[in-house]
Image (tube, grey):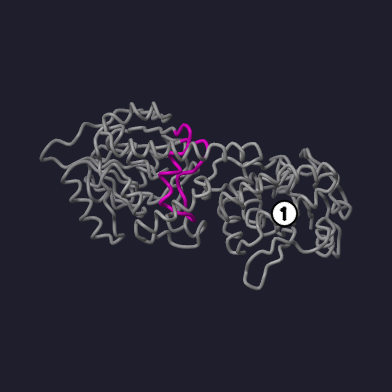
Amino acid sequence: MDSVVSELEGTLLKGGDPFSYFMLVAFEASGLLRFALLLILWPVIWLLDMLGMGEYGLKLMVFVAIAGVSESEIESVARAVLPKFYLDDIDMEAWKVFSSYDKRVVVTKMPRIMAERFVKEHLRADEVIGSELVISRFGFATGFVKGNIIDSYISSRVAKLFIDEKPCLGQGRVASSFLSLCKEQIHPPCMTNQKQQHDHQLVRPLPVIFHDGRLVKRPTPSMALLIILWMPIGIVLAAVRILVGIMLPMWAKPYLSKMLGGKVIVKGKPPPPASIGNSGVLFVCTHRTLMDPVVLSTVLRRKIPAVTYSISRLSEILSPIPTVRLTRIRDVDADQIKRELARGDLVVCPEGTTCREPFLLRFSALFAELTDQIVPVAMNYRVGFFHATTARGCKALDPIFFFMNPRPVYEVTFLSQLPVEATCSSGKSPHDVANYVQRILAATLGFECTNFTRKDKYRVLAGNDGSVSHTSFANQLKKVVSTFKPFFH
């Protein structure tokens, strides 16, 4: 059996410095203070690396980022946050070589727990060998790793794995000691050749459809410094934007939005408001952030009630438009939507949850059963620093993080109202209608349709079904204050 052992940092990943991944763990597992502390120590880590003592720098990163964090929390970040950033840094040439072998092993100096999920599920490796964290009996990381010398520890693990026969190929940087255990060695940059083109070569790594975490960009030292410097400004800017959104009438918001750095791009022709005595139009939107219905109302310059599946009480209070909370009991929800449509227009996001990547989740067919006046609306957004959605974190912070971005951009594309022959009135099933709407919206945005649901997303990212506990406004406010408390001292 052909086998390959490949180094993760600097080979399968273009970047050889794992610092930014420890910064992600520090931010997502602990918060701003540990994030800032690790950044402060970056010059020391860099200097150790320059002096040929990179292993001590690595151990310092492990200790600062992970000491005192529960093992389950580290696993959660490795499952929900890190894969997206790893995949964005994949060297496709090295991946092609790696994927062309029958038995695939990845080695990393990072703690195995940080890389194993991604490497096995997305790079489809058979084994992952990395440094091992020392975990206390209470389930918390001590900040130390097993073995005095990480490189020697990893090499011994590789030797034990291939005790009968040497690996056919070793991919890694010149200084990697495990390469001496392999029959052949190649160093980055890796190039494929005819000899390495096997019939079973995988086309590409599996995509990351669901991911979590607040940071949009990988926190390299310069980017992390920029984020920390922007935080106080962003908090003030978010407060101003939210107050303006609550106090101003809808017709005035587009003008103030431009002045405060926001931008909304509108395509297509929106329908006129529902006339008195007629049933309203149901706007069926793709779901990118909780701001989708608010932005739609701003574009239409009138308050359109939005159907919500599961948002925090704080988000409901801050919302400048009426919200209609569904119960997930089909008959009850259907009656609720019918009553709202009898009063006027309504917004619904049938995916039931947000998705950051260019994929659309499966559409619930309930909306198709209740009306024939359906207007599909393709929503998309771009932000610079912070994601406005979370599966693991505090959902009450979603609108705040959205408005903390320097220049949030929204794109709203109105499609034509569905013709009668494309609705249930012509005998089509609700599922056919829902799938058709999903397809035309995906085509408009250049996205792919999937059959994933809300439960699939939360099962992957948070290990639950996505239900939001309706804690009191006071408790949610405490979470908000505790998150940003470091900037008020």
Q: Residues within 10 Å of mark 1 (few under 14, many from 20)?
A: many
Which quadrant holds residue 77?
bottom right
Residue at horizontal 27 percent and vertical 60 percent from the top? 330
The x, y position of residue 473, in whole percent, is: 34, 56
Q: Nearer the viewer, residue 309 or 390?
A: 390
Circle 1: element type: strand
The x, y position of residue 134, in whole percent, is: 71, 66
The x, y position of residue 95, in whole percent, is: 71, 45
Q: Nearer the viewer, residue 275 or 52?
A: 52
Residue at horizontal 50 percent and vertical 39 percent from the top? 232
What type of secondary structure mainly makes up the magenta span?
Answer: loop
Is-magenta flag for residue 385? yes
Q: Which residues are magenta?
A: 382-408
Q: Nearer the viewer, residue 145 or 109?
A: 145
Q: Is 4 displayed left or right of 76 in the figure?
A: right
Which quadrant holds residue 127?
bottom right
Q: How many marks?
A: 1
Disc 1 target residue: 110
The x, y position of residue 113, in whole percent, is: 66, 59
Q: Is 181 displayed left or right of 102 in the figure?
A: right
Mark 1: which amino acid? Met
Query: Where the N terminus falls, by quadrant?
Result: bottom right
Q: Which residue ends up furthest to the left in the rendered image?
A: 277
Q: Nearer the viewer, residue 103 or 54?
A: 54
Q: Is 66 displayed left or right of 459 in the figure?
A: right
Residue 73 vs 363, above or below: the answer is below
